[in-house]
Amino acid sequence: MPFENWMNRILLILFLCVVCLSACKKGYDPIAEERVQAEKDDKIIQDYIAATPGLGAVIKRVDSAGIATGVYYVELAPGSGNELFTNSTRITIDYTSKVLTTGEVFAESNNFHPSFTLGEVLRAWKLGIPQIKKGGKIRIISASKYAYGPYDQPQINLPKNSVVDFEIELLDVTN
């Protein structure tokens, strides 16, 4: 009888292990998902650039520490000055934000001119805004990863993974 109890315990433990392992969700790889989304976003942006006359000649891709990002920009007006941008730099802007694929405006300043520290804005803005100076104007086209990412934004009616198009005028810069 003691051998049977011991054997039953081993079988029970093996059974529980099999049940636990079979319940595990296999195949979820967030890094692979992000890579797939980045490829989709880049295709949307490249198709848009190709379909917009003259845009391919003037648009540039932002590099971050020598690595190409999913953020593109067109300098509409350079501005003037010799600003040094850090995360604590305070910027005052006028902006319009649209979904690239539909052209639908989802946010704009309406001439309110909000101020932010550069460290608290979207990554696309952190990378794009330093490309101009005070008084300058820039258009930033951003892959979803550098904007709102894989999260719905119901308060502004923006679906997850949206490729966005920002037009920003840099009114003031304070360090």
Image (cartoon, rainbow, N blue to C red):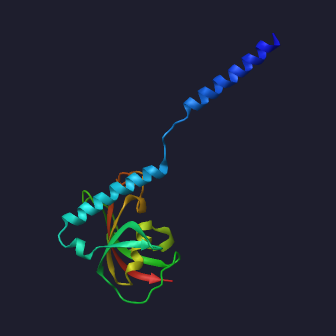
Q: Quadrant of the N terminus?
A: top right
Q: Residue 82 at x, y = what percent?
A: 43, 89
50 horizontally vs 64: left or right: left
Q: Is residue 126 above or below residue 43?
A: below
Residue 17: quadrant of the picture: top right
Q: Is residue 27 above or below residue 152?
A: above
Q: Nearer the viewer, residue 69 or 11?
A: 11
Residue at (44%, 66%) from the top-left corner? 123
Residue shown at the point (24%, 62%) measured from the top left: 48
Q: Residue at x 23, y 75 (%)?
A: 57
Residue 114 in sight in this render: no
Query: Relative to residue 116, is residue 39 depicted above or below?
Result: above
- Residue lying at 59% horizontally and 26% vertically, measured from the top left: 19
Counting from the top left corner in percent of width and height, residue 143 is at 36, 61
Q: Nearer the viewer, residue 88 or 40?
A: 40
In the image, farthest residue toward the left: 53
Is residue 20 something that shows in the picture?
yes
